Image: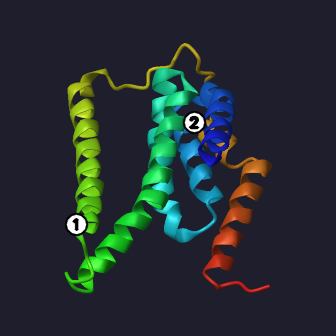
Amino acid sequence: LAPIFEEIFFRKLLIDRTIKDGATLSILLSALMFALFHGNLSQFFYACLLGLLFAFVYIKTGKIIYSIILHAFVNFYGSVASVFFTASVKNISQGLNIANMGDIGIIAIYLAILVIVWFIGLYEIIKNYKKIELNDSKREVFLENPALTVFFNVGMVLFVLYHIFKILMSLKIIAI
């Protein structure tokens, strides 16, 4: 359920309300809020990069289902599939007498899927490179300083401070 609710909130609701300030600004805002929402430093950077990708996909297609599917795949691959992968690697690293062909198969399938998905993604980016643009001037409202308006309003400042506080607590820099 997390990919569904997170994509509806961080892509559908947030981007639909901020796209008038520009697609680039809307994508950055969505990605940064998504990264902060995860509440820990270890997830912040890759969640921000994934947030950029999911926001771009949503804006380019106009369909939230694509970012939900991507998000679900990333979550499944990073949590469920990686558990089996890690256990298989551990079995092999402890000695081949513990490992079996199933462990080798799990590692091979995991890595093959990872490589295939990366190559498909790179191929699509290279193939469609000239078509990738964020020209949404028909929907933009030109503000004097859109970044200041979007990033430094009271709600945004409180959201950022709260999540930075959560990250500092998770790192045990602040204790309550």
Which residue type carries mark 2?
Ser
Residue 89 location, quadrant: bottom left
Please, is residue 41 above or below residue 98 in the view? above
Residue 73: where, in percent of width, then height? Answer: 45, 45
Which residue type carries mark 1?
Met
Residue 2: where, in percent of width, then height? Answer: 64, 48
Q: Residue at x 25, y 28 (%)?
A: 129
Q: Nearer the viewer, residue 167 or 91?
A: 91
Mark 2 or mark 1, whichever is nearer to me: 1
Q: Nearer the viewer, residue 62 or 21?
A: 62
Q: Secondary structure at mark 1?
A: helix
Q: Which residue is mark 1?
A: 101
Q: Give the class, few, some or many, for how many residues have Cα within 10 Å of label 1's Cα (few <14, many ≥20).
A: few
Please, is residue 40 above or below residue 156 in the view? below
Residue 172: where, in percent of width, then height? Answer: 65, 85
Residue 13 location, quadrant: top right
| Residue 24 in sight in this render | no
Q: Residue at x 32, y 71 (%)?
A: 88
Q: Give the class, few, some or many, for how many residues have Cα within 10 Å of label 2's Cα (few <14, many ≥20).
A: many
Q: Residue at x 54, y 70 (%)?
A: 41
Image quadrant where one finds the C terminus? bottom right
Q: Secondary structure at mark 2?
A: helix
The answer for how far apart the CA atoms under marks 2 and 1 are is 48 Å
Q: Residue at x 51, y 44 (%)?
A: 72
**Which mark, by number, is residue 73?**
none
**Which mark, by number, is residue 26?**
2
Residue 103: where, in percent of width, then height? Answer: 28, 67
Lateral position of residue 67 relative to residue 148, left or right: left
| Residue 119 in sight in this render | yes
Lateral position of residue 91 relative to residue 75, left or right: left
Image quadrant where one finds the N terminus? top right
